[in-house]
Image (cartoon, helix red, strand yellow):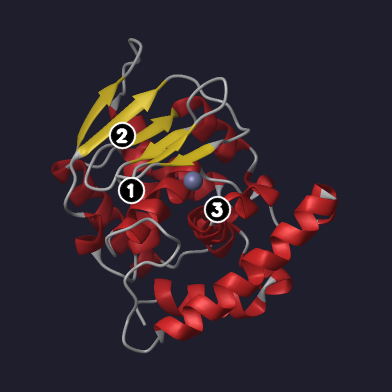
Amino acid sequence: MVDAAGFARPLEKVPALSGLDAARRAHLRDLAGRFLRDKHFSGAHGLVVDAGMRSTIATLACWPVLDLGYDWLTGWCEVIVYPGGFRARRVHDDEDGVVHEWDEDLAGESWDRGPLVLSWEDLELDLEQPQDCMNVVVHEIAHKLDARSGAADGMPPLPRSIRVSEWQREFQRAYEHLGEIAGRDPDAALIDPYAADAPEEFFAVCSEYHFLAPERIEAAYPRVADLLARFYAGG
Ligand SMILES: [Zn+2]
């Protein structure tokens, strides 16, 4: 059952979600209810993950699949929530396709078919500061979608309307451009230079912009923005 306050919170805090019309809100709420029935939540380090927190996480986790459909979130069942985290993210993508992210503390982690791991503190910060265009839940769900192709490599399974060669060409071009700029002067990058760490991070970070501030990714990398819009619309 979706907790009313937990569902309302991201819709109030995140401008892009506030603009959803009534039909899409109802659809998102349905998906969140399914997520809550489907996933098992647990708190790490003694954190109690209450009904409001579960509904907030479920709502944000279902946002990226609002048009793709809930099936994209199947195949795993565990959500682990840590009380704290750290915003400067580090990544290690090991040979088993597991993307780890951490700094002094865990920000988020996404395992192919394994648990979704989140820092509640990071999520709170994302909700209070939507202008930063960051959302750890959207970011980690993007990794989950990406991994459904068999590897978290920055290219999720594509609809027939998007050619693999087009996706690879445009994402590679933008990724290399960002890497060059970020290498010279991270402050000059038009999007979070963390995206230059690896192709899968580029996809996850660009996905955050697609949902939170599409105009930013359109201005920086219009062809990537177009591909993301087509992908998340379900082709
Ligand atoms: Zn990541």
Vertical relation: 122 (above or below) 162: above
Q: Amino acid at mark 2?
A: Arg
Q: Earlier in the sequence, mark 2 or mark 1?
A: 2
Is residue 231 in sight in this rendering? yes
**C-alpha span from label 3 to label 1:** 13 Å
The quadrant in which the N terminus is found is top left
User: Of 170 and 119, which appears nearest the observer?
Assistant: 170
Q: Position of residue 217 (x, y in %)?
A: 65, 67
Mark 1: is the Cβ under 8 angstroms from ligand 1?
no
Tell me the crowding category of disc 3: few under 14, some 14 to 19, or many 20 or more residues within 10 angstroms, Cα based. some
Seen at 44% across and 35% down, the residue is 108
- Does 37 sit left or right of 50 as displayed? left
Q: Amino acid at mark 1?
A: Gly
- Residue 48: name its quadrant: top left
Q: Amino acid at mark 3?
A: Ala
**C-alpha span from label 2 to label 1:** 27 Å
Q: Residue furthest front?
A: 95
- Does 70 sit left or right of 83 as displayed? left
Residue 198: numbered disc: 3
Seen at 22% across and 47% down, the residue is 113
Q: Earlier in the sequence, mark 2 or mark 3?
A: 2
The residue that mark 2 highlights is: 54
Residue 226: numbered disc: none
The residue that mark 1 highlights is: 97
- Does 57 sit left or right of 132 as displayed? left
User: Of 20 and 88, which appears nearest the observer?
Assistant: 88
Q: Nearer the viewer, mark 2 or mark 1?
A: 1
